Image (cartoon, rainbow, N blue to C red):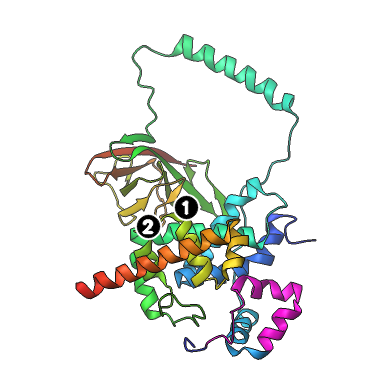
Amino acid sequence: MDAASDPQAAYRAYGPALVRKAERILRSREDATDVVHALFVDLIPKWNRDVDLPYLYRAITNRCLNVVRDRGTRARLLERESASAAPIGRVRLEDQVVGVGLIAALAERLDEGHLQVLVCRFVDDMTQEEIALHLKLSRKTIGKRLDRIRDEVISLRGQETAS
Amino acid sequence: MSGLACIGEPISWLRLEQFATTRDPAIASHVAQCPACKHCLEEITADLVALPPLVGPEARPARTWWKWAVPAFAMAAAALALIVVIRPRGEDSAREDVVVVKGVGEVVLGVVRERGGVIRQDVRSFAPGDRWKVVVTCPPAASASVEVAVTEAGAAAADHPLMPATIACGNRIVIPGAFFLTGTNKNRVCATVTSPGGDRGTACLTIAPE
């Protein structure tokens, strides 16, 4: 039976990878597991065989961004983030490993499309070509969005220094 | 481990996850030489994820149109007749689980029940041990703060089992936290929604014991 044949098979096959991905964003295994479980519960009634790991990766990114945008949950995640081990951070944004705090701060300044690119590049460590393929956008658009993300991080740092 | 750097362009986590099944030689070659990517792959292979059981609403098989259309038309006609004949004049037709708040828009209150791993979004009855979550649907782009109060029939005061939460609106946004209902009386679950401008409204629904 292939992984996409039914929700249960896909949950078993892709669930662990998705929990790890959500955990890299949320820095909490418990919240990551909740997000993945909720996604599959919602997908059961509308399941189709086109669901694959990249599709679920995109869906989990959106779900995690919603969690980070929620101010109540965000406060709890930020508290936990400070206590969790720093991830390896192979791709850094202005020499910074992207975590809940930075995503939350950027969520106040950037739209959904930019945040998706942020997660693809600095959390999932995708190349620009890979992001373009993953999000079905042009390479040029990805480059522009990354430039805007960097500008916002520099602006954020400037504000922090000033205050 | 935050000091490890890749020797070139890192292999993305998605490709590393897929490597377990595809065994791409290009990735194998990179991982053999790159301590950072090798470490990430080892993290994946060594990781054990305990997933909760997935039990949810069953996917329903497709039905031919007439199987649902005939009863649906019959029921619609009966409902229309009932509305025309029975509905008293001046009756308030507003749903109590829906409230319109200035600065937020239409807010729909809902609940989700978890019983022994089975999640239902369409029930309003409780038994001891059921776990309940509150969900709110409101127009995207709005934000609102939500305060949940649960009042048991006959009780003098309401309980506030969930922390007040500020949410970014969307479809069925889950208010953090969950609660249990006990006793043999009906419970009214109300969500007071406040817009950033301070306008507020309350939507309620009733959960009855089984």
* Residue at screen point 50% across, 57% down: A62
Pinpoint residue A47: horizontal percent, then vertical percent.
Answer: 67, 49
Q: Name the residue under label 1.
A: B128
Looking at the image, which residue is at 64% across and 17% down?
B74
Residue B116 visible to the viewer: no
Region in magenta: B5-32
Question: Does the magenta-highlighted stretch encompass residue B24?
Answer: yes
Residue where numbered disc 2 is placed: A70
Pair 1/2: label in front: 2
Residue at 35% x, 65% y is A152
Q: In this view, does B160 lie to the left or right of A133?
A: left
In the rendered image, is residue B206 in sight? yes
Q: In this view, does B1 lie above or below A157?
A: below
In percent of the image, x 38 and y 46: which residue is there? B141
Prevailing secondary structure class for the magenta stretch in the rendered image: helix
> From what the image shows, is residue B15 above or below residue B106?
below
Q: What residue type is labelled 2?
A: Asp
Crowd tier of the residue under label 2, counting other residues whose Cα lies within 10 Å: few below 14, some 14–19, many 20 or above: many
From the viewer's perspective, tell me whether residue B25 is left or right of residue A81. Answer: right
Spatial CA distance of label 1 from label 2 is: 30 Å
